[in-house]
Amino acid sequence: MRRTVVAAAATAMAVSLAACGSAKESGDKAETPSKAADKGPITVGLLLPENETARYEKFDKPLIEKKVSELTGGTGKVVYNNAKQDATTQAQQVETMITNKVSVLMIDAVDSKAIKGSVQKAKDAGIPVVAYDRLAEGPIDAYTSFDNEEVGRVQGQALLDQLGDKAKSGDIVMMNGAVTDPNAALFKKGAHSVLDGKVTVGKEYDTKEWKPENANANMEGAISALGKKKVIGVYSANDGMAGGIITALKSAGISPLPPVTGQDAELAGVQRIVAGEQFMSVYKPYPREAEIGAAMAVALAKGEKLDSITSGTTVDSPSTKGIPSVLVPVVSLTKDNINDTVLKDGIYTTAEICTTKYKAGCDAIGLK
């Protein structure tokens, strides 16, 4: 499925919320000022969840650092920690940042429920919290992410379109993300909204910690249970797991490979798309999300309202109502629009994608 990149590359700071039933207008609701608002240079405490997914270290961290510097005239700084998929570690990192009196926290939670107490501690210390990429529980002051149900719908529709008339000829396997990640539930919901009734889901898994090796083991089990001739497609919630899935399919001698979805437009995923091994990924414009998250953090650190950023839109978490929010649109990435997405936006260069191993595939689709 081809989708234009225009919406995803929108330059306006306020991005409309789409397909989010809990979104509503926030009116003139004031933000809670930070106690650090007038105490010198702004320090943003950035806590990211893991380092197995390439995006966090390669894109999110440097993009947020750059934007914070721009918004503060070079005086603001980012203090960074990565929890490496450990919720206890992340809670300890929050404690340290509270002790060090950061101006504001940006938290991409390992476990959206487990982080609730830490968010409350930050709030009690007068430190506002931006939920970044995942909607954490607790008294969150702002939230930015992508339209995560739409991510699932885009993945499901791409798989359905690729299967075409063969959609009922066998089974698909659904490899969802970790149950501790609230986004994973939204991806799953969106995918099911497209696929249910139109395909047969032979096996479905919630993949522990999003790890490729766990997806690989799950896929081996699915092939064993269903038979390799019955698997006609795989819904994979992200690119890392798609790599593990494709390894399992190859090891089982399945050829040609069935269409496999993905998400994050990781370099390895894009290269697999070029090579014809992975059918699609979901390109999420990280620069926009990072810019919005940084703008929210700096505004909150200054004690400012967020209406100019969010246009008054909000979402509800299980524990907090009316969180000022921005959701960024996404794009279905296939071999047909690599030029118009990750290359055009400077995420990768042609040289990075088209290494010797992938040169023939790049030549075939006009990447030079």
Image (cartoon, rainbow, N blue to C red):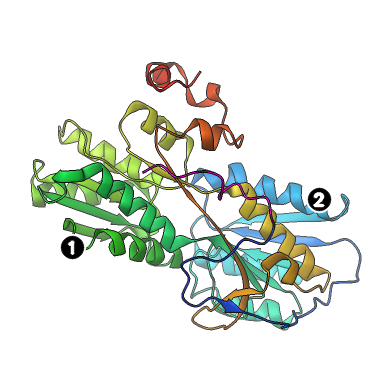
Q: Report the disc number at residue 69.
A: 2
Residue depicted at 30% across the width and 32% down the height = 277
Residue depicted at 53% across the width and 43% down the height = 5
Q: Is residue 18 visible?
A: yes
How would you classify the magenta stretch by its main secondary structure?
loop
| Residue 331 magenta | no
- Which quadrant would the N terminus be assigned to in this image? top left
Q: Is residue 100 visible?
A: no
Distance, label 2 to label 1, CA atoms, is 50 Å
Q: Quadrant of residue 363?
A: top left
Residue depicted at 88% across the width and 53% down the height = 75
Q: Which residues are magenta?
A: 1-12
Give the mark, 2 or 1, whose residue is nearer the N terminus: 2
Q: Is residue 74 above or below residue 44?
A: above
Local packing at callout 2 (Cα closer than 10 Å; few below 14, some 14-19, many 20+) is: some
Disc nearest the viewer among 2 and 1: 1
| 69, 210: nearer the viewer | 69
Circle 1 sits on which residue? 197
